[in-house]
Amino acid sequence: GQSLEQPSEVTAVEGAIVQINCTYQTSGFYGLSWYQQHDGGAPTFLSYNALDGLEETGRFSSFLSRSDSYGYLLLQELQMKDSASYFCAVRDQWNTDKLIFGTGTRLQVFP
Amino acid sequence: EAGVAQSPRYKIIEKRQSVAFWCNPISGHATLYWYQQILGQGPKLLIQFQNNGVVDDSQLPKDRFSAERLKGVDSTLKIQPAKLEDSAVYLCASSIPSRLNTGELFFGEGSRLTVL
């Protein structure tokens, strides 16, 4: 089967940089997505990596290493509003329109 | 562009009762999903529609859960009878091929179910 592992919780202070890791197991790989979800809110798409390397979108960057089955989300210049849960997700090897989500990492940003 | 609409936002029922959730996807989105998110976990796919046809319902507990998308637009997810372990947030999502190719789904805010 396919599975994704993330740390359950990460804490940081405003202005800092934090990295949220994701390791995955899948026979067929079609890309790694990242989503943000505030408490009681909808998961919202942040980024997608299909190839190795770093993708940058403003304060957020996402990295992928397919040889290591590993990716991370990097959040810079942390703000209080970044406190949320972050999920990595892979496209299912048998149904690439289906996303399989990790268990999520809860980020708490302190002043 | 209007987002994915879901209702009700909250529902409390007793076990063995029934409940129904409604979803209106983004206009023009042919693919619609129902995900279940238990507290502290990631979303888990229950069922996926392409227009009004079912693509994947392999993880739908069919003895108690049912879903339909009769006209290829709105969808309804029903649970009957509910169990305590069905307490979760039920998320509806939709997308189109160009966005699916980059792993992007558009989620609603969900319907939070509490089964007592």
Image: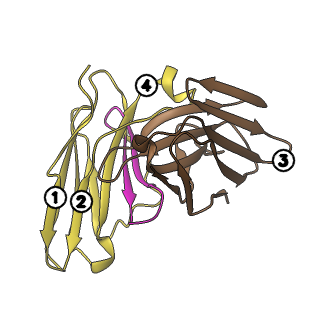
Chain colours: A brown, B yellow
Report whether mark 2 lies on the same chain as mark 3: no
Q: Chain letter of disc 1? A: B
Report whether mark 2 lies on the same chain as mark 4: yes
- Measuring 41% from the left and 46% from the top, which residue is drawn there? A37
Q: Which mark lies nearer to you, 2 or 4?
A: 2
Give the spatial CA distance, label 2 vs label 3.
37 Å
Residue A66: percent from the left, percent from the top? 80, 40
- What amino acid type is highlighted by mark number 2? Arg
Identify the residue under disc 4: B96
Q: Nearer the viewer, residue A99 or A104?
A: A104
Report whether mark 3 lies on the same chain as mark 4: no
Give the SS element for disc 2: strand
Identify the residue under disc 1: B10
Residue B104: percent from the left, percent from the top? 49, 32
Image quadrant in which you'd find residue B101: top right
Q: In the rendered image, is residue A86 in sight?
A: yes
- What amino acid type is highlighted by mark number 3? Asp
Identify the residue under disc 2: B112
Q: Which mark is residue A68?
A: 3
**As drawn, which residue projects farthest toward the front?**
A111
Mark 4 crowdedness (10 Å alpha carbons): few <14, some 14-19, many ≥20 = some
Residue A99: percent from the left, percent from the top? 53, 44
Q: Bounds of the magenta span? A: B33-52
Image quadrant in which you'd find residue A8: bottom right
Give the SS element for disc 3: loop
